[in-house]
Amino acid sequence: MNIIVRAFFIAVTFVGWAVMSKYCRQNFAWSASIVFFFTAVPVLILSRATLLSIPVPDIKSFLILSVAGALNGFGVYFYSQTLERAGNQSGAFIVTVSVVMVMVAPLLAYFVNGEVINLKQTAGLVCAISAVYLLS
């Protein structure tokens, strides 16, 4: 799958559930719980061959990924809760979160994995910071 097509699909699915939750007029707790339960199903099905062919992560990696998963759960909870409270401004909130993700990803990659941020990416971060300011 082309990288742009793949990125588009991922972006639509990441924000799509939030938009569908508002459309369904369901409580944020139910929406997030249902969506993320069923998020695990295709991941496990599509990954089963790989999971069965490689060793289980070591305890340190398992713990780090478990903490990351738990933190993601808190993030999803607060994301869905904020969307419910955002009313007609839910689109602006989704965009703000997306732009903040654009800002955080290279910084986190730098601090955790030592990935160097180049001049072009730095300019992108400045633009992203401006966008967050303008959207809030």
Image (cartoon, rainbow, N blue to C red):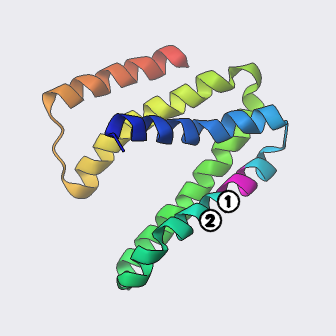
Dot 2 and dot 1 residues touching (CB under 8 Å): yes
Residue matched to label 1: 38
Q: What residue type is labelled 1?
A: Phe
Query: Toward the viewer: 117 or 45?
Result: 45
**Residue 98 rendering spot, x and y as whole percentages:** 49, 33
Left or right of residue 107: residue 86: right
Callout 2, which amino acid?
Val
Q: Tell me, yes or no, whether the highlighted magenta stretch contains residue 116.
A: no
Of residue 48 and residue 117, the one placed in the foreground of this image is 48
Q: Which mark is residue 29?
A: none
Look at the image and give the residue range highlighted in magenta: 32-37
Q: Residues within 10 Å of mark 2 (few under 14, many from 20)?
A: few
User: Who's the residue at 60% across and 27% down the image?
Assistant: 93
For the point 23% across and 22% down, the residue is 123
Residue 97 location (% of width, % of height):
52, 33
Quadrant of the drawing holding the N terminus = top left
State the image coordinates of residue 65 (x, y, percent, origin top left).
Answer: 44, 69
SS state under label 2 = helix
